[in-house]
Amino acid sequence: MIKRQQIKDLLKSTAFDTEVTVMGWVRTFRNNQFIALNDGSCMSNIQVVIDFSNLPDELLKRITTGAAISATGKLIESLGKGQTVEIKATSVEILGDSDPEKFPLQPKKHSLEFLREIAHLRFRTNTFNAVFKVRHALAFAIHQFYNERGFVYMHTPVITASDAEGAGEMFKVTTLDFDNTPRTEDGKVDFSQDFFARATNLTVSGQLEGELAAMAFGQIYTFGPTFRAENSNTTRHLAEFWMIEPEVAFADLEDNMQLAEDMMKYVIKYALDNCKDELEFLNTRLAEEDKQKPQNERSEFSLLEKLDFCLANEFERLTYTEAIRILKSSKPNQKKQFKYLIDEWGADLQSEHERYLVEKHFKKPVILTDYPADIKSFYMRQNEPDAEGRKTVAAMDILFPGIGEMIGGSQREERLDRLTKRMEDLNIPQEELWWYLDTRRFGSAPHSGFGLGFERLVLFVTGMTNIRDVIAFPRFPKNAEF
């Protein structure tokens, strides 16, 4: 096969008058002479100039938007504006035709809603080329961050019999015949006849299994798909998404906060250093989108300013109790501008409250700690009651501008008696988590961890506004296309 050169390399090349071969997809074809060609290696196209008088009409008719072609010719300095090099083609071969009457991507701006309907083709647009290059860089940076710090990468089960969050919104895994489901004497589904001989689900978190590994390796992380059967059709929810979940032995809440802050700054800096063209493109795109909004709805920062803002500032750390005091006395709360008014300790904070703390009050990322025990999970370490007798847990949430909660984590409850009592209070069957409780029976130690929804991170770094636009093929209620 002919050796081809990538367009991203040729655009930087000064090896003029050398023969090159490029292969890619036609973005536009003007005047039967100028082909804008893209091969996916970068967002920029290279211009291929052809001599239409030396090419048969049949071939020219097949050079259409979306067609895959191979072009061979001399790399020359460009005479036109907007590019430094172009290819003066001596031969063009059609590798794959594209019917211009049916190809849905035309050289014009398409709405993101329309592109979701053709998600199998939207990668060919500049916006999604940029988004998924940034997603790749962030995923690579996550692995590099933990590898440099000696963490062990664990693959935790996708199929599980436990509900780590206790929310019950899980997808069932079964091979039972729905038309002839076996039943027990009391009429319930007889899972003993199912593949695993018990009820199983797709995981919502690898945390519990991650804790087991941390009790042997000291520090581990997971990075894998998770699933939640929450019937939510918002711009922030997916039924299938990816989670990063580190677990660290001999670490308290302070250690946990520092690890999370270090990780966020590391991966954002990696994206800024390695995706300059993509982020500049997305920065411009977001600025143009902002111009269409009313003044009061426009972003305070540009995308690049927002990313630099997170690197330049130490994250503000404060307790939930302090946050409630700030929010209760805030102007939006006093003037009843919040949708959910803060009137008492114990309220579950909403995105509007989190964003107020980050964007208006502190003007920096915020880490909230020590939440009320009643609104947090069973595995979080219980603090001693405060002066007013209120029960809190050693939890932490990291809040970011424009998005609210980015990371949720805690110091884990390592004391067996406290953990089993909490499970009793919440009616969580101990016999189903006997293996989890064993880590508290045999060599228990203080340990901490957190979860980062990867798509939320990508959403933040790219400036996109809908989480369905930062995962290749989004799964959400009533949709599992492609």
Image (spheres, rainbow, N blue to C red):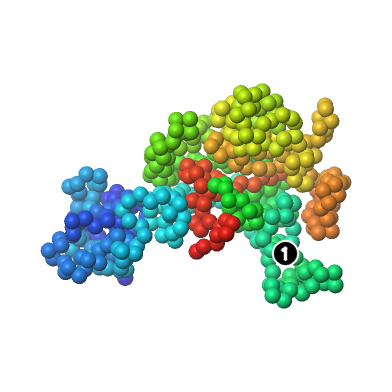
Residue that numbered label 1 is attached to: 200
Can you say whether 390 is above or below 466 in the image? above
Residue depicted at x 77% and y 69%: 189
Quadrant assignment, res 394: top right
Q: Residue furthest left?
A: 53
Task: Look at the numbered disc 1 and give the secondary structure of its residue.
Answer: strand
Quadrant assignment, res 367: top right
Can you say whether 441 is above or below 393 in the image? below
Residue depicted at x 41% and y 52%: 129
Q: Quadrant of the N terminus?
A: bottom left
Q: Note whether residue 274 is visible.
A: yes
Q: Is residue 435 left or right of residue 337?
A: right
Quadrant assignment, res 67: bottom left
Can you say whether 28 is above or below 98 in the image? above
Q: Residues within 10 Å of mark 1 (few under 14, many from 20)?
A: many
* Residue 355 in the image, given as x and y percentages of width and height: 58, 34
